[in-house]
Image (cartoon, rainbow, N blue to C red):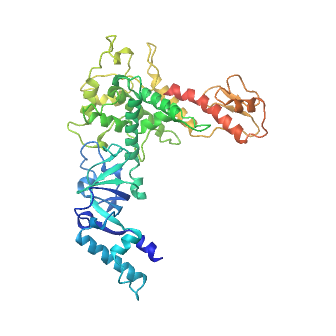
Amino acid sequence: MSLYKYLQEPFGPYPENVILSSHCKKRLNLKSLRMECGASPIGLDETEFIAAAPKSSRIVRGITKFYGIIELDSLEWLSPRGEDYLQRELHRRLVDLDRDRRSKGFTLNDLYRVSGIRMWIQCNKRMHTRFLTSNGFETSLVINSENRLYNVLSFDAATFRRSGNFLTRWRLWVLIEKLIQDDHMQTPIEERTIDWLVDQYLLRLRKHSFGRFPRHVCRAEVIGIFAAHADWILAQHLATTAKTVQKLNVQKWISFCMEVQSARYSASQEPVSLGWGLPENGTIEEGILNLSRFGTIGGGWDKKITSALKKRPKKTQSGKSRASSTKTVNRHPSTTSRYKSTTQFVYDSDFSEVSTSSYSGSSDEDLIKDLLKTAKIYSHRPGFRSGYFEWQCPVCDYSIDLLNLKEGDTKALSSTNDQTLRGRKWKFLNDEQVQTAFFDIVQDHLAVHASLVA
């Protein structure tokens, strides 16, 4: 290794309170964030809770430390002890490279002028880590030490693997805020349900989609993304009464969470588990809406849920409450029985159409079957049987025959692809244009099933 490359390697690690002086900035950029607790790797999925960390958490039993690489903007950032430590490490490196010559005259000042100085720093973690929500740094991940703030620019691989849920959840939270801000209809909170979220997201996607053939995104896919972290979003709402946190209709979101819990369990019982609606490394608890993994809260989460369900919905201009404007049904007796001793309540469904007087209990099973069937469709690439030019929908009787296209089959295609298929201006099924057109037709049809399930 050349002298330059060897000296470019970060020095350290050194404790923050030993290596840095009072002249160092109180907010630094940090690369390659690495975290540990009790000498074992840990990530933000395990260190960040909505409420107080439960007693079983590792961060209660030990100190959480984090490491990262900083680059010095000035040698004045170093304390006298820090400067001495770095000068000694620099000398050891020079000795390792050339034991005879030793390069005695090469100092920290020389290194700083030639290539700058990078070093690993060790800190004790304090407070909650903020992602996309720090004032003045809305695009940053900010982690606190005992003495200063750090803007995290990159992760160590092991820490990143243990932080995926934290990052995804806060991206979703910020997305919900943006959808509310961009809603020119200024929809009241009582009407902000999962259906409203999906509608707003797809509208936003259409406005910001670029390219000639943007990928089709169906409602079922969007619902699945929110479903994976629905209980975390619910816990965010229940943990505080602050208006800035209340973004959705909590009663209907509880209903959605219960639907998700049931669908997760049903999906897990399939011969090939789809993992639908689960966060990374998520587990399934049958019939239980368990928020305890998000922290310990005064009175318990069950009490918070019951209290939220007891609240009377606000009146609309017509004088009727929003919740009572449609008929509601008790959708999951096995789940809601946990709260029967306190209150008897019903739920609006955010998964199905408005209930009618002909409603029967079997529609719950049909709903979940349709949901799983739709999820299976999207987990397999559509195609043709060998020697055939016809695709059959696995849900209904609809089919596509490329040699005998029906009216309406190609409504989702561009005029060019429509003319290519109908004019049979192709020779092979694996032609790129044929495949693109075929997938567009299939996706357009499957979107109908997905919207019905949603």
Of 152 and 391, which appears nearest the observer? 152
Residue 127 on image: x %, y %: 25, 50
Relative side of 319 to 445, left or right: left
Above or below: residue 39 compared with residue 386: below
The residue sitting at the bottom extreme is: 100
Residue 113 on image: x %, y %: 38, 70
Quarter of the view holding residue 184: top left
Residue 160 on image: x %, y %: 41, 54
For the point 42% across and 53% down, the residue is 161
For the point 48% across and 32% down, the residue is 204
For the point 60% across and 30% down, the residue is 444
Of 361 and 183, which appears nearest the observer? 183
Number of numbered callouts drawn: 0
Of 90 and 57, which appears nearest the observer? 90
Residue 384 seen in this snapshot: no
Relative side of 273 to 31, left or right: right
Above or below: residue 213 compared with residue 360: below
For the point 34% across and 25% down, the residue is 189
Residue 101 on image: x %, y %: 40, 87
Residue 322 seen in this snapshot: yes
Above or below: residue 52 compared with residue 443: below
The residue sitting at the top extreme is: 318
Relative side of 392 to 88, left or right: right
Quarter of the view holding residue 240: top left
